Amino acid sequence: AGLRLISAREISDVVRLATASGALVLEADHALLRLEDPETKRYVIRSYYGGADRSQREQLFALDKDVSVEVIRRREPLLVHRVDEDDRFDGANASVRSILGAPLLRDGRVVGALTFYDKMAGDEFFPGYFSRDDVDVLSRYARYVERAVTNALFYRQAQAQTNFDESTGLPNAEYLARRVDQEMARGAGRTNAFALATCRIENLPEVRNAADPAHADRVVQRTAEAMRQKLRDFDVLARTADDEFAALIPEPGEHPGDRVADLARQVAETIVRDEALNEPLRIGLVFGYSLPEGSDEPRESLLARAREPRIRML
């Protein structure tokens, strides 16, 4: 569920998946997601998942308004094990037994709230109650939702600001820099929270001089396609220079060096098989990567280390 979320590019897909997948993961009867409206600064419902009819929805949404206010105020998960024993919500008209909610953060700010109502175990006819174990599950799940929302908003903002390379359709260096800053803040010094990999077409100037500019453009585009095909959907690939691509790879695993080596080999094999692309000059690719060295490392240092040649493919 988490990987599907952070792979989604459109915010409409993210909010729909967040409630539908969250309800399945937590076995909840109802799920709602609110996001802050950038103009009004109000938290509006962006997605609902559940089987409530119109009248039930009106009551549930009214209750959710109060619950979301509490979640946003607390800035931490909320568990109401039994609504009838909690004086904050026991007067609600909605026939809800149990409530679970979590704030959604972006750059340290609360930008939304994710709430669930009534635990529905598969073998039970009546709703049950959420527990502390459900709070732990929601806390982990909310991190995926936060990342997915951030990804989608960044993508939409980048499109609006034309932060894309026209030749390849990839995000540019400015876009990647913002995403790296976001991941560095989220990782907070955690080991292998993400990796930054680079691929440079080492002899692109020579290729451009030896053939026509259109051929050099095809080399760039084919390399971009090969990189994109070998990366995961939620990795972020950008064109950061005329001859360079960089990939932000969240959660690269215990052996990020092996992951980058596999990426280099697969991309190089794709380029080598294209004989026309390697005429009149064989394309040379150089790969590097870096991992953050603590939360205080400047982004420029991380990028500089990622550009150090580690793997050369000719």
Image (spheres, rainbow, N blue to C red):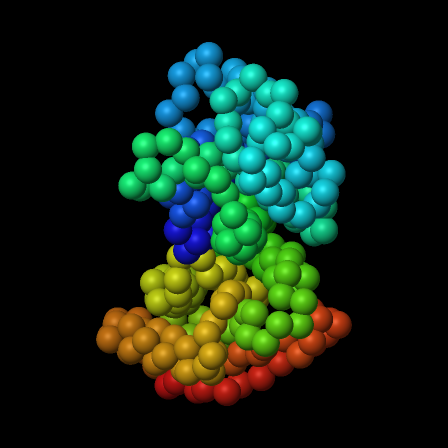
Spot occupied by residue 221 in the image (x, y as percentages of width and height): 39, 61
Relative to 229, 49 lies left or right = right
- Which of 116/3 is in front? 116
Please, is residue 304 above or below residue 23 in the view? Answer: below
Q: Position of residue 90 (x, y in %)?
A: 62, 25
Q: Residue at x 58, y 84 (%)?
A: 308
Task: Give whichever of 254, 197 is nearer the camera.
Answer: 254
State the image quarter where residue 84 is shown. Answer: top right
> In this rendering, is residue 78 above or below 61?
below
Q: Write the residue at 67% across / 67% down.
A: 188
Q: Could one spot residue 120 in this view of the protein?
A: yes
Q: How many numbered badges does the structure rendering display?
A: 0
Q: Is residue 157 at least partly visible in the picture?
A: no
Quadrant placement of the C terminus? bottom left
> Is residue 118 found left or right of 124 in the rendered image?
right
Q: Is residue 139 above or below residue 73?
A: below
Q: Residue at x 40, y 42 (%)?
A: 27
Q: Is residue 41 above or below residue 254?
A: above
